[in-house]
Amino acid sequence: MDWPLMALLIVVGGFVPPQVWAVPGGAEIPEAERLSPLEVPHDFNPSAYTVRDGQLVVSTDSAEVLLTLSAPLQREIEALLARYEVPAAGVVVMEPKTGKILAYVNHQSTSLVGVGDMVRSAEAPAASVFKIVTAAALIDKGVLPSTEICYGGGYHRLTGADLKDDPRRDRACATFSDAMGQSINTIFAKLAVRHLDAERLKRYASAFGFGHRLPFDVPLQPSAIDIPVEELEFARAAAGFWHTQLSPLHGALLAATVANQGRMPRAHIIQSVRYPCGEMAVLRDAAPFRAVISEDTARTLAQMMTRTVSKGTAFRAFHDSEGKPFLPGIDVAGKTGSLSASDPYRAYSWWVGFAPAEAPSYVISALIVNSPTWRIKASLVARESIRMAMQAQSGAALASANP
């Protein structure tokens, strides 16, 4: 397979130390060079904005920074999280081709999480969102979406017995595609053990940006990655049981890569910077940051991800009790994830995806951190964010379906 080399991308924005990326095909891609970087004020905080003439602006000691955010969309998502008393959340809405951020919601109503910026922090486990990476590696190894695997157990944890075929306990069967939509851990674990190894999965994780400081206008915490060699822990990592961490902004880039024919955009939130002397520096739309997977692999992944909404883990969030879609006429692709930790208790709920699935206009990444008593999860936030974004674009109201 020929993997495109994206060299000398001219990007305006924050500085990222030089590093080398390992891509799935085995080649090395030097990090894109940056020419004439825009000087971002050192005290720039994307969340510390004010509304001025309908635009969101951050005032710093040295300049005024105009953000790319949509003021109505930003405010509606903030209101949604406040209305449902969500303890902590990070939500990103992004254009998949340009990486332009339309909503950047760092929500913390309590001290439950205790991190600075929920959008850029990679403290949360990636959970089953990591199945996107594993699925890409499996597709490139020739595993077809129609491949059927029988299984038993593995719903909430994986044991060594779950990795072995056993007709006596393998009472359920599903395709690889349905395993993506329904987030079936055992199928991903079995396929990973049969077709992948730790080194190959690490290469794919690296290509998707895990372990690297991705370019952004302010520092972005790298998403941690640890792929064990031992079979059971390797299988657990491939299925999304710990071993990886993720920030909501990086989650948006994962989904954007699939939506953008395998190319990861460069996320940016600064539209322009105005200096006291009257001069203004304008941030240009960035070219894709780098190629990650082939167009064919991205297309197959996108089709598999629609199962999450049409018959998988997000079906109830996107359909009413009679099975009618809350967003009629809009196909949505996505991936959910959930894990909980104790001491203190934190329930992590993920959604990353895009809409419309066939011609993506919006990428949504939502991380909700709940206490033992909760009211909404990430899939509902994603659905309402899509509705709000499309309503803002078209001017036609899509009725809210908040429970």
Image (cartoon, rainbow, N blue to C red):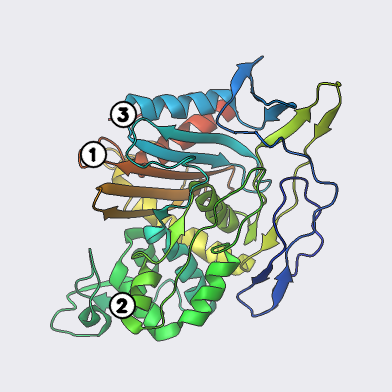
Tally of marks: 3
Amino acid type of the residue that numbered disc 3 sits on in the rendered structure: Tyr
> Which amino acid, by three-letter code, is at mark 2?
Ile
Asked if residue 184 is positioned above or below residue 348 in the image, the reply reads: below
Q: Position of residue 68 (x, y in %)?
A: 66, 32
Callout 1 crowding tier (Cα within 10 Å): few <14, some 14–19, many ≥20: few
Q: Secondary structure at mark 1?
A: loop
**Mark 2 or 3, which is nearer the eye?**
3
Callout 2 environment at 10 Å: few (<14), some (14 to 19), or many (20+)?
some
Labelled disc at residue 84: 3
Q: Quick one: label 2 or label 3, which is nearer the N terminus?
A: 3
Q: Secondary structure at mark 2?
A: strand
Residue that carries the numbered disc 2 in the rendered image: 149
Which residue matches tag 1?
A: 321
Q: Position of residue 14 (x, y in %)?
A: 71, 46
Q: Quadrant of the C terminus?
A: top left
Q: Say what amino acid the circle numbered 1 marks.
A: Ser
Q: CA distance from mark 2 to mark 1?
A: 30 Å
Disc number placed over residue 44 in the picture, else none: none
- Give the quarter of the figure containing the N terminus: bottom right
> Residue farthest to the top?
53
